[in-house]
Image (cartoon, rainbow, N blue to C red):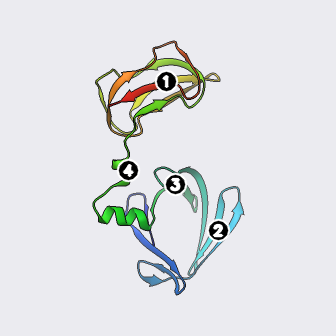
Amino acid sequence: MHRIRVNGQEPLEIDLNSKGSFINGTNTPWQVEELGNQRFHILLGSRSISIEVMNHNREEKTFQLRVNGKSATVSVQDQYDILLNQLGFDQQASRKVASIKAPMPGMVLRIEVQEGQSVEKDQPLLVLEAMKMENVIKSPGQGIVKRIECKQGDAVEKGFVLISFE
């Protein structure tokens, strides 16, 4: 069983088992053909659907897709995610981040937060220059900045702890 939400709309319950494929409890035959390069063709009943995967966030279980030429954001929950939600546990909320590490070697151009500051998910924390590109390092979740382990102009190696959280 999987729960799929497209662009934040009501979720679809998809169940693939030995009795068939079911969408919201209705037996719905479908076929998927992989075309390569993250592109797929799906026959859903009598509907033809062209899908291209533009981006995938494995941790958040989300996909940015182009469906028949239109952009869509799809989130997926498997049976374990559904069970955790039913029991009152949100897997994303329970994940606590202790620190942010440099994803690559580079130079700290700007620090956007201060020690003791409360931050939200996806809030910019700092800007790291690597290979002449500016990379905005964002917060993976809510938290409070405990300590900033670098300063503007520092050259850092991959894996260096940039910011630690309470």
Which numbered disc, 4 or 2, marks the residue that appears first in the sequence? 2
Q: Is residue 53 above or below residue 50?
A: above
Residue 133 appears left or right of 149: right
> Which residue lies under the disc numbered 2?
41
- Circle 3 sits in a helix, a strand or a loop, which is it? strand
Find residue 149 and report its horizontal and vertical position in percent: 43, 20
- Depth check: 53 or 81 in front? 81
Q: Residue at x 32, y 21 (%)?
A: 115
* Residue found at the far right of this picture: 36
Q: CA distance from mark 2 to mark 1?
A: 39 Å
Displayed quadrant of residue 30: bottom right
> Which residue lies under the disc numbered 3?
63
> Which residue lies under the disc numbered 4?
92
Q: CA distance from mark 1 to mark 3?
A: 25 Å
Which numbered disc, 4 or 1, marks the residue that appears first in the sequence? 4
> Which residue lies under the disc numbered 1?
127
Q: Residue at x 41, y 30 (%)?
A: 124
Displayed quadrant of residue 5: bottom left
Task: Determine whether label 4 and label 2 are within 8 Å by CB.
Answer: no
Find residue 19 and report its horizontal and vertical position in percent: 52, 87
Comparing marks 4 and 2, which lies closer to the viewer?
A: 4
Task: Determine whether label 1 and label 3 are within 8 Å by CB.
Answer: no
Q: CA distance from mark 3 to mark 2?
A: 16 Å
Q: Residue at x 32, y 62 (%)?
A: 85
Comparing marks 4 and 3, which lies closer to the viewer?
A: 4
Comparing marks 2 and 1, which lies closer to the viewer?
A: 1
Q: Is residue 131 above or below residue 26?
A: above
Which numbered disc, 1 or 3, marks the residue that appears first in the sequence? 3
Residue type at numbered disc 4: Gln
Residue type at numbered disc 2: His
